[in-house]
Every structure is written in structure tokens, then in C-alpha cells.
């Protein structure tokens, strides 16, 4: 992670993604980055669904994948001249402008929890992601807010007290609640877990420490240990879902 962060800083790109505002903050993406490398073969065609400022698409391109980025907004500045990434601006809140069985993997980082509040359909969107995935392809979901997160509770309290303007996520999930959304869809959950106990965005503001590799390594180790002991109140869920092969789907029907 430190090597990748040094690269984007050296290229003058860090200011174009708030996830890269410091090494400590960038490290909050380490699980998503690691699972991408672990689960998806290099040079695969992949979709960054709801790409935001494009930080994850850029990472995928750097690692040798062939990423398509999709968003309902205009192309982010980070991807303006990035020829390794194919960007598409969507015109519909649910349907996707790709043929069936296009992608080897789809990534959704901090997207699903915002679908309903912006007038979309969670189940409809998941069905579309299943459609554009190849049989056997993976849907990797990260930063899905945990219903019992202590950070979400703290956000609500500070917002109610008027101390901040940022409130908690409207949609938060349990494992069972998220898997219920997959009912009737050709997905099988192959891995899931909770992560992040420490408030990375706040720690990423510490002057002098936020870009120190040793401090970041300490925070990562503490976060992993606390995540193991206090999983129930961690900030996020992640899920790795696999689209079932066609013969398996047909046999269930």
C-alpha cells in the first residue's frame, strides 16, 4: 500500500481522490485492493460499478486489469486522460449499458447502500450486475455499512448534537439482510467479513504521522486486532459473491 501511495503522490494524483489524502487514509482501501489481487486474475476485464472519483479504477489499471468505470455522473478528473480505463456515464439508475456476460468481475465499493436513497432499486441493480457478469464471475462488495457499527452511532450522535454536518448512512446492513437481497439471483456467497474499527478518516488528519509508514503499519495492525475482537461493531461488511454456472442455475429451476 505504501508503494502504491508513493506512486500516486509522485505523479501528482493524490489530490484527485480523498481516499489518497494520506497514507493512513489510503490504507483503509487495503482490503479491497488485496482481495482484488487475490481473487481476480490479472488482465481480466472488470467493472468498477459506481466508480466515484475513479481511485479504484486507477488502481485496477495500475495492476494490469482492463477496467470499465461506470457512474451516473461525468467522468472524474482522475480518469480524464487515463486511456487504460473505459468510462461510461449511465443514463438509468438500474439498467447497465453492457451486454450480458461481459465481465470477469465486478467491484462495488461504497455503492449499494446509496442506491435506494437516490431512487434506485437494490435488487434490480444486483440483478443487473449478475446479468453483466460471466458465469463463474465474481461480484466483490466493500464498504457496506454494518448496522451495529460504533462509528455510525458516533456519527449520528455528533450530527444530532450539531457538532458535525455529516450524519450516519441511511442504509446499514446485517449479513442476513444483505444476503436476503440476493434471493432469487444466481449468486453464491463464497466469502464475507467485517472490518474497520478505527476511524481512518480522523486518524488520517494527524500531522506528521498520517504519512509515516511505521505509524500506518501500527494502525493497520491495531485495526486488524480490534476487528477480530470487536467484529460486531466494526464499520463495514465485505462480500465476495460468485455467479453460478449456467448448468447450476438451470438445475435449480
Image: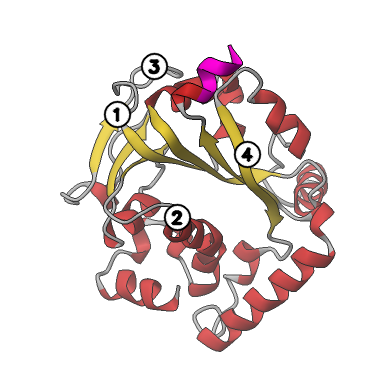
CB within 8 Å, label 3 to label 1: no
Q: Is residue 168 left or right of residue 83?
A: right
Mark 4, mark 3: which one is toward the viewer?
Answer: 4
Q: CA distance from mark 4 to mark 3?
A: 27 Å
* Residue 185 to residue 27: above or below: above
Q: Is residue 249 magenta?
A: yes
Instruction: Please report the residue visible at 34 percent of the width from the left and 55 percent of the height from the top.
Output: 60
Q: Which residue is mark 4?
A: 189
Residue 120 visible in the shown view: no
Residue 205 visible in the shown view: yes
Which image quadrant for residue 47? top left
Find residue 89 and name its label. 1
Q: Which residue is mark 3?
A: 92
SS under mark 1: strand
SS under mark 3: loop
Give the color scheme: rainbow, by chain, secondary structure or one colour: secondary structure
Which image quadrant for residue 88? top left
Q: Earlier in the sequence, mark 2 or mark 3?
A: 2
Q: CA distance from mark 2 to mark 3?
A: 27 Å
Q: Earlier in the sequence, mark 2 or mark 1?
A: 2
Q: CA distance from mark 3 to mark 1?
A: 9 Å
From the image, which quarter does the C terminus lie in?
A: top right
SS under mark 4: strand
Amino acid at each position: 500500500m505504501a508503494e502504491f501511495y508513493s506512486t500516486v503522490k509522485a505523479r501528482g494524483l493524490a489530490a484527485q481522490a480523498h481516499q489518497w489524502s494520506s497514507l493512513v487514509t489510503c490504507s483503509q482501501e487495503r482490503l479491497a485492493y488485496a482481495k482484488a489481487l487475490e481473487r481476480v486474475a490479472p488482465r481480466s476485464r472488470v467493472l468498477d460499478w459506481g466508480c466515484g472519483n475513479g481511485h479504484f479504477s486507477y488502481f485496477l489499471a495500475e495492476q494490469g486489469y482492463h477496467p470499465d468505470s461506470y457512474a451516473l455522473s461525468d467522468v472524474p478528473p482522475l480518469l480524464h486522460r487515463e486511456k487504460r480505463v473505459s468510462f461510461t456515464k449511465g443514463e438509468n439508475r438500474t439498467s447497465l449499458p453492457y451486454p450480458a456476460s461481459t465481465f470477469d468481475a465486478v467491484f462495488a465499493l461504497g455503492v449499494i447502500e446509496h442506491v435506494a436513497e437516490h431512487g434506485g432499486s437494490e435488487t434490480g441493480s444486483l440483478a443487473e450486475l449478475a446479468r453483466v457478469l460471466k458465469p463463474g464471475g465474481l461480484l466483490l462488495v466493500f464498504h457496506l455499512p454494518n448496522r451495529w457499527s460504533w462509528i455510525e452511532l458516533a456519527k449520528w450522535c455528533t450530527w444530532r448534537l450539531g457538532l458535525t454536518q455529516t450524519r450516519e448512512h441511511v442504509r446499514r446492513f446485517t449479513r442476513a439482510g444483505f444476503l436476503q437481497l440476493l434471493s432469487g439471483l444466481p449468486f453464491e456467497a463464497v466469502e464475507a467479513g467485517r472490518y474497520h474499527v478505527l476511524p481512518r478518516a480522523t486518524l488520517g488528519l494527524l500531522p506528521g504521522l498520517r504519512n509515516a509508514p511505521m505509524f500506518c503499519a501500527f494502525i493497520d495492525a491495531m485495526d486488524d486486532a480490534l476487528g477480530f475482537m470487536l467484529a460486531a461493531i466494526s464499520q463495514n461488511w465485505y462480500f465476495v459473491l460468485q455467479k453460478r454456472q449456467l448448468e447450476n442455475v438451470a438445475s435449480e429451476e
